[in-house]
Amino acid sequence: MNWQDEIKNSITSIDALTNRGFSARSVENPRAMRITPHILSIMDKDVENCPIGRQFVPCMEEGIVNKKELTDPVCEAPCIKDEVLVHAYDDRGLIICSLECPTYCRYCFRKRMVGDNQAWFARHQYLTALAYLKNTPQIHEIILSGGDPLMRSDDWLDWLLSEIEKIESVRVIRIHTRVLSTLPSRITGEICNIFNRHSKLKYLNTQINHPKEITKESIHAIGMLRRAGISIGNHAVLLKGVNDNIKTLKALCLGLYHAGVIPYYLFHADYTPGISHFRTTIKDGMALHHKLQGWISGLAVPVYAFDTPRLRKVWMNPSYVKEMGKGRYKLTNFRGETMIYDENDLIL
């Protein structure tokens, strides 16, 4: 089955899922749901206790929203230029290529935007964004994100990569996609040939949160990308009930490393609304991260980080995190700016 057929044959409702013999509770007005046949093939029938199903199947806990949570949890909105370009860091820009994903993560920090499978930005909006990049030479790296940029056609991606490569000040292009775990059939010989033609496209970051996601199909797709000259990193999210124990986390990091993927980041679950059932405490997260160090290769140990609304990314180690007691922490970023994070009421 090619990747377009996988999308057409995906599960998009709880009823369709239960009709396939999976146990899942009915949820009123869930946000967008789509589960590819590939993800379905590695899910347990008891989805609530499955580390794969927990990531993608709507649950009633999503309706529990805390007043501390934020619709825009990393405060991207003030940094958006011409709707499709995010300029949040001085030397990097992020282009929103799509509002669609192969499979929708229940904890997505952009869930305010993604999920409309019919919504596409117009080409003139990208041309405006490209003009901004030409006039902002301090931006030397461009990230293609979304939604998932690989939901776009090969021709469209080839066009955008070609246009970005014309900008002399841009030295590196990076793609952020989850297709390596959710839709590995998207990695074809044709798309790898396109990637190989674009010398500024050097990196691809994916998201794999559990060792069950490292399937033979995913490993094959990883190999194709590496042979096309693409270096691959992983952005995992620390999720309660998915990977919040040392056995799973170690297996995940080593599985990625053995497959040729560098475990780049392990993110603390952020301020996204309705994800209190996914959050761990900072104390537990730091303890898990500490247990990885020394027991596996340093290249296989990700940076534990928290993408905050005020400080951007904070590295979660004692140099930048000070416990103040009773679930309150003082966080410091790379600029020396600080904020207080109070995890009380944010964890279910």
Image: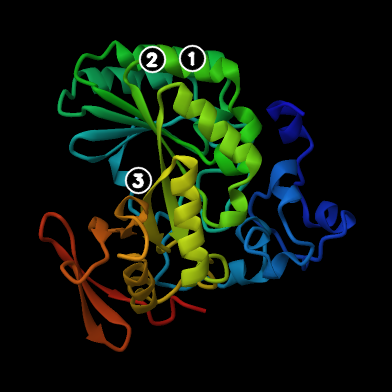
Element type where label 1 sits in the image: helix
- What residue is drawn where x is 52% and y is 65%? 248
Instruction: Say which of marks 1 and 3 sits in front.
Output: 1
Residue 172: give its label.
none
Residue ID for mark 2: 198
Amino acid tagged 1 = Ile
Residue that badge 1 annotates: 194
Q: Which mark is residue 77?
A: 3
- Say above or below: 183 vs 310: above
Point 28% across, 81% down: residue: 328
Looking at the rendering, in which quadrant would you find the N terminus? top right
Nearer the N terminus, badge 2 or badge 3? 3
Task: Give the answer, above or below, for where 148 lies relative to 72.
Answer: above
User: Horizontal and vertical percent for residue 182?
Assistant: 62, 43
Task: Name the element at disc 3.
Answer: helix
Q: Nearer the viewer, residue 319 or 125?
A: 319
Image coordinates of residue 281 in percent, x first then y, are 40, 77
Is the residue under label 1 in contact with that under label 2 (CB below 8 Å)? yes
Question: Residue 87 or 46: which is nearer the viewer?
Answer: 46
Closer to the camera in the image, 142 or 227: 227
Q: CA distance from mark 2 to mark 1?
A: 7 Å
Question: How far is mark 1 from mark 3, CA to CA?
Answer: 32 Å
Which residue is painted at 18% across and 67% down in the image? 320
User: Counting other residues with Cα less than 10 Å from the Cα at mark 3, is it few (<14), some (14-19), or many (20 or more)?
Assistant: few
Disc 2: CA contacts within 10 A as few (<14), some (14-19) or many (>=20): some
Q: Please state which amino acid type lies under the numbered disc 3.
A: Ala
The type of colouring in the image is rainbow
